[in-house]
Image: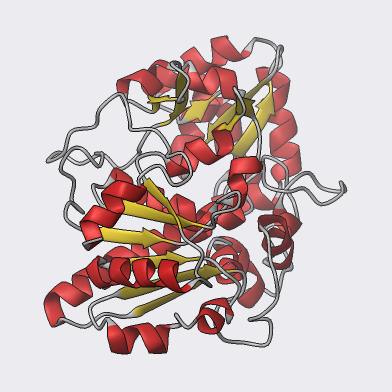
Amino acid sequence: MTQSAKGPLSGIVVVDLSRILAGPYCTMLMAEMGARVIKVEPPKGGDDARAYGPFVNGKSTYFASVNRGKESIALDLKADADRAVFEKLLDRADVVVENFRPGTMEKLGYGWDTLHKKYPRLIYASASGFGHTGPNSKDPAYDMVVQGMGGIMSITGNEGQPPARVGMSIGDVGAGLFTAVAVNAALVHRLKTGEATKVDIAMFDCQLALLENAIMRYTVEGEVPGPLGARHPTITPFQAFATSDGAIIIAAGNDGLFVKTCEALGRADLATNANYKTNALRLKHHKKLEHELESVLKAHPTSHWLAVMAKAGIPAGPINNVKQALEHPQVAARNMLIEVPDGNGGTLKLAGNPLKMSAFHDPKTRPPAPELDRDREAILAFVGG
């Protein structure tokens, strides 16, 4: 699903004022779904992410990874001539996406209230640290800040260890995903009613929404969750176990799977043990059960136990590093490592699109991320000069 091929968002024009990661991740997904995404960047340097490594021949692959398939025009939104071009773009657009600190667009004269009056069909999407309301609305935020404030860092890592950041930018990417979902819903709403709407996404809100059962454990049971390493907080056994040469994840998510696990390990006696008859009991006695299971698992390597678990129909897997994950045959089968021109005659291998739809082709290559201001002439022609 690319700009050159039809996708579910074919015909939708997105003006993308966003930079770095949260907003660009949203608009990349929209480009992948067929939208025409026109990236409006400041003339001096463009998107900040163009300066983030790693670099190939002086070009940011960080920028390339989340801006593929877009067009670029450099506009100074404080200069009258460029504002005129920008306003022509808004007149042709279906969606504008920005991730400035709240109040910035209003200072430029392009806040929601102003734009909605002038462009009543334009959907306005904002992804900011804390949203457009509340006492922290105007505060600056980066991924690490909202990971800490939103509680996710407090439940990540191992017990008794210092706080750990989630190993990818869950604050930014989570906000980008929620923004894309909301924009698509706003497009459906406009299709049904003719009404455009404002989408207000806060990175902090998204972190709370992603806390999943940690919220219920606090609001229902009064427990303040902490880090548990590789163990599930409410299901046992559902964790990583040591083997003779590494570790294996075993996810016995119900009583039936627990019985199968015990049988596969040659410890059917554990399934009839009064301490382990239900999940609640297994959770209560998880340390003793973990010791019992690991005493068996440590006798053989991970590969042996993966074969045993597969034969028994028990959900299990290795703990792959990034290299091992990308080399898994499922990656090629699902087209999850695609190629993008790097602008220097070579190619970059980037994460593919997980949105698979039967009506649309999922090619093995994608258009590159644009050079700053690369598409000026085409965009000016699009808006009439």
Q: Residue at x 46, y 45 (%)?
A: 254
Across and down, in percent, residue 307 comes to 47, 13
Closer-to-camera residue (16/301): 16
Examine the rendered structure and indicate whether residue 339 appears above or below residue 239: above
Residue 96 in view of the camera: yes
Q: Is residue 340 left or right of residue 278?
A: left
- Where is the N terminus found, in terms of image quarters? top left
Examine the rendered structure and indicate whether residue 94 appears above or below residue 278: below
Q: Is residue 233 left or right of residue 342?
A: right
Closer-to-camera residue (291/130): 130
Coloration of the structure image: secondary structure
Tell me where residue 149 sits by quadrant. bottom right
Examine the rendered structure and indicate whether residue 200 appears above or below residue 178: below
Q: Residue at x 72, y 42 (%)?
A: 229
Q: Residue at x 58, y 66 (%)?
A: 203
Across and down, in percent, residue 81 comes to 42, 69
Across and down, in percent, residue 319 comes to 60, 26
- Where is the C terminus found, in terms of image quarters? bottom left
Across and down, in percent, residue 50 comes to 59, 42
How many circles with numbers are drawn on the protein? 0
Residue 252 in view of the camera: no
Closer-to-camera residue (93/87): 87
Tell me where residue 144 sits by quadrant. bottom right
Q: Is residue 303 left or right of residue 146?
A: left
Q: Residue at x 71, y 16 (%)?
A: 298
